[in-house]
Amino acid sequence: MSELFSLKEILHMIVVAVPTAYITAVLAFRKYRTEKWWDKRAQCYCDTISALNEIIVVCDAFIDEKVHGVTLRKADRELLEAKYKKSKEFCFTQINIGKLLMSDKAHEILSGFEQELFKFETNSDQTVIKEAVREVTEGHLNAFIPIARSDLGANPLFRGFFQ
């Protein structure tokens, strides 16, 4: 009787296939989790940078109004104030989230940013506040971006090399 596969060959295939399939599945799942974690970290950094940038843009608009005489309508002013408040609160929220997703150095920068902003809340001159907040925000943003880039492994020097 001629069989297509002998029992010995079938056992050999199973012994090889099952561990190989298991190892492949474990490695694929590990890679998936790593990529998802990296995506979450990248999104956290991007959202934080975006919020810091929004604070700078809003401060610039208020500074332009007071220093350069640019006129803002009441609706525009209210929109800018809402954006400023939302971005500031978002940055403060990111301090807690950042403890999980960001590097320690990035977390320190955000914590320092929060402490600096609280210093300006007691001043009554809004122009002085916005100028100071803008300067502090830009300083922290300039310190934050290289850390985010390093933490995510995004080196702009090699950008064109791998594309």
Image (cartoon, rainbow, N blue to C red):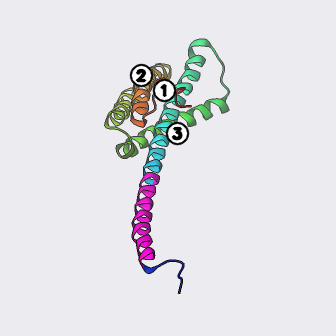
**Which residue range is magenta in the image?**
8-32
Q: Mark 1 points at which residue?
A: 158
Q: Position of residue 151 (x, y in %)?
A: 39, 35
Seen from the viewer's position, the closer of residues 45 and 83 is 45
Is the magenta region chiefly helix, strand or loop?
helix
Mark 1–mark 3 contact, CB under 8 Å? no
Q: What residue type is labelled 2?
A: Gly
Indicate the secondary structure of the residue bearing disc 1.
helix
Residue 111 is situated, as x and y percent measured from the top left of the image, at 34, 35
The answer for how far apart the CA atoms under marks 1 and 2 are is 26 Å
In front of the other: label 1 or label 3?
A: 1
Mark earlier in primary sequence (1, 2)? 2
To which residue does mark 2 refer?
139
Query: Which residue corresponds to mark 3?
Result: 86
Farthest bottom residue in view: 1
What residue appears at the point 47 percent right and 46 percent down from the top-left corner? 40
Residue at image x 54%, y 26%? 160
Question: Which amino acid is tagged 3?
Answer: Lys
